[in-house]
Image (cartoon, coloured by chain):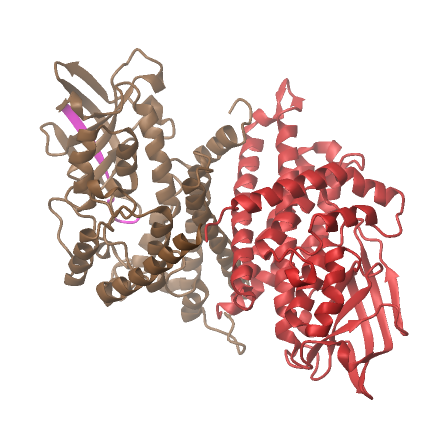
Chain colours: A red, B brown
Amino acid sequence: MALVLTEEQSMLRDSARGLISDKAPVSHLRHLRDSKDPTGFSKEFWQSFAEMGFAGLLVPEEFGGSALGYVEAGVVMEEIGRTLMPSPFLATSVVAASALNRGGNAAQKSEFLPKISSGSLLATLAVDEGAKHRPLQTSLQAVRAGNGFKLSGAKALVVDGHVADLLIVAARTAGSAGERDGLTLFLVNPAAKGVAIERTIMVDSHNAARIEFANVEVNADSVLGEVDQGAGLLEGVLDIGRGAVASEMVGLSDEVFNRTVEYLKSRKQFGKLIGEFQALQHRAAQLYVDIEITRAAVMKALQALDTDVAKAAPAVAVAKARAGTTATRAVQEGVQMHGGMGMTDQFDIGFFMKRARVCEELFGDANYHTEQLARARGY
Amino acid sequence: MSESEAVDLEQFRNETRAWLEANCPPEMRKPTTSDADVFWGGRNTKFSSEPQRIWFERMRDKGWTVPDWPKEYGGGGLSAAEHKVLRAEMGRIGARPPLSSFGIWMLGPALLKYGNEAQKKEHLPKIAAGEIRWCQGYSEPNAGSDLASLQTRAESDGDDFVITGQKIWTSYANYADWIFCLVRTDPAAKKHDGISFILFDMTSKGVSTKPILLISGYSPFCETFFDNVRVPKSHVVGTVNRGWDVAKYLLQHERAMISGMGERGVGRPLGQIAADSVGTDTLGRLDDAVLRSQIAGFDVDEAALAACAERAVDLAKAGQAHPAFSSAMKYYGTELNKRRYEILMSAGGVDALEWESERSKQGARPRAWLRTKANSIEGGTSEVMLGIVAKRILDLPGA
């Protein structure tokens, strides 16, 4: 497989870019933030997104989806990263749709996937409980009760948590925190008794929530995948999410970089364009190289996911680690090279810095993934 | 790719895998550990082992010393997709390149683009067959990063040029049979406009070489002197005084080649090599948390660079590559290789300091470490590479 976009993928990129840059430029995010919009994204725009086939991009055709792959999902995420569009695409269309499609039984798939494709159902994965992403540390308890389970515990950061119609909750049915065995995924109705959702206003003005579960009753049909054996499913779905967030970070980095290079070509000091100074030229060139290398690593990871999710973990770890360090560097250089203007709220660069920080934490930061690679290589 | 093309490619993969399995000697599937493991070809060459000879001859006979060159010039005539499959299959079993050569990496691509038919027919098959070993006459004592200021002059005399001057950092000039050389054919023109790209035999009267002893204790480079060397004008590649175009094109290939230096992705992971000397803790992790973290960071960047190198080839084949991208790769690849050897030296501790002994393979590690310091200088310094990226790719002003 060549590490370049196919003609079809390029066309997908162009149509996603056209739609997103037209309807949801950075000013769209700014407006949602300033108006304290209660949903945090545009439902109307999400509907047109769904009509173009993006909401069900990964969903099989029999459930109304486009049946495309992770490379294509990455193409859309990269465009989302360019304008920082708040959208349910990551949580619903990539992560939750993958969880349902990979782990769901026939009844679960036919109940939820068509609604994801049509844009009428929002779903999200609830994993993280502590300050850092440590999926195996899951300790939210699910104990057997009658024909089902009772869930108790709390999730610290659930993307789109306050707008979701369906929660996919990682819980511990056996063993203790840190163990791979004993994890189970549950489909939970956020309106169920005992679920308390607090929207968290985040630094990046994107949607997230804290969710508490107090003896929440679910029946046996709510188990996604197998009881106690959810780790494999969870890790695969997380890797898909990581690939998608890494793509968003490539788009974000590239956009910040392009804006910064344009600034170097227009801002004058000491009687010349600041882009003439070699100190800035070399830093810009280094950043360009970093971004291109990261772009290739991310593409490689997405192709690996398309080939076999179960074997993609090392490539995904490389991609998410690189995306984290690259985006962090891109936004820092972006602000620094824009000087005082970069520090103003009026200027968009700050939005990119804030979003990059959140993306870095989502599904594991660069340190986490670098550590995963070291362990995989046995040292 | 159509379905039938995909089927054909899969068949090619199976055949290639079976052929390599049957024809690549086991000794040629181990990482190279010294210069003797590398076969460079040439008039005076000797094989360092029988497996090296067998492997080279079998690959040569299939045209796979230069798999993607046209068959008429001794190549394998493989398509881009087939070539990628062959590289992947060779990588899978750790097969060594059968022939290393500046003819393959640098001159060949330039001749294919700028050479006339007679030049291609004369030189390319001999490069493919490892018969002639080439060296590169580019840098001069006063023309390093500012290569275009070179002063070696070629004066017209009937059907010949008469060449006088000095080159430096000429890799393996003392072993080379022929040289591809930049000479000034018009001293009055602006510096980029008076240069020609010319080929001649290193046994020509007036050519002499003198190896330069480096900090590694080795002498891979020479000073090369030309004293009224007579070369037919028909040996100029491309147009007289337009040699800078050829030179730049060749440099792109040279930089791509240097960026790929270092035994990437083969052999044992760096972390495990380090564990041999540093030791491990009760969890089996390297017993130096900071070094472990450096290695892991290195591994991330190395894997990402490998993906980028693969993508660079794919972009080139798809006609989407920026011509200056090899400068970006050269910069990153060489800096990364230096990082690898800093880690190896740190991991090796005092064991990596021995310079002369059987035990240390004559100081293989410290000598290789010192050798890598040239990576970010030869073929254009890192600073020059960043300048090229800034100017040609980012289009920054006044660069």
Residue drawn at the location 59% of the way across and 42% of the way down: A11
In the rendered view, tell whether residue A273 sits above or below residue B188: below
Count numbered badges in the picture.
Answer: 0
A191 with respect to B383 (left or right): right
Range of residues picked out in magenta: B216-228
Which residue is most to the bottom?
A146
In the rendered view, tell whether residue B246 sits above or below residue A75: above
Residue A329: tell me if it is visible.
no
Residue drawn at the location 76% of the way across and 39% of the way down: A23
In the rendered view, tell whether residue A110 sits above or below residue A142: above
Residue B222: in magenta span:
yes
- The overriding secondary structure of the stretch rendered in magenta is strand
A76 with respect to A145 (left or right): left
Residue B294: tell me if it is visible.
yes
Residue B316 is drawn in which quadrant? top left
Q: Name the foreground residue: A196 vs A77.
A: A77
Residue B273 place in picture, x, y as percent: 41, 66
In the rendered view, tell whether residue A223 sits above or below residue B54: below
Residue A261 place in picture, x, y as percent: 61, 32
Residue B340: in magenta span:
no
Q: Name the foreground residue: B206 vs B195.
A: B195
Residue B313 place in picture, x, y as percent: 41, 45
Which residue is most to the top?
B188
Residue A44 place in picture, x, y as percent: 82, 47
Q: Name the foreground residue: B146 vs B348.
A: B146
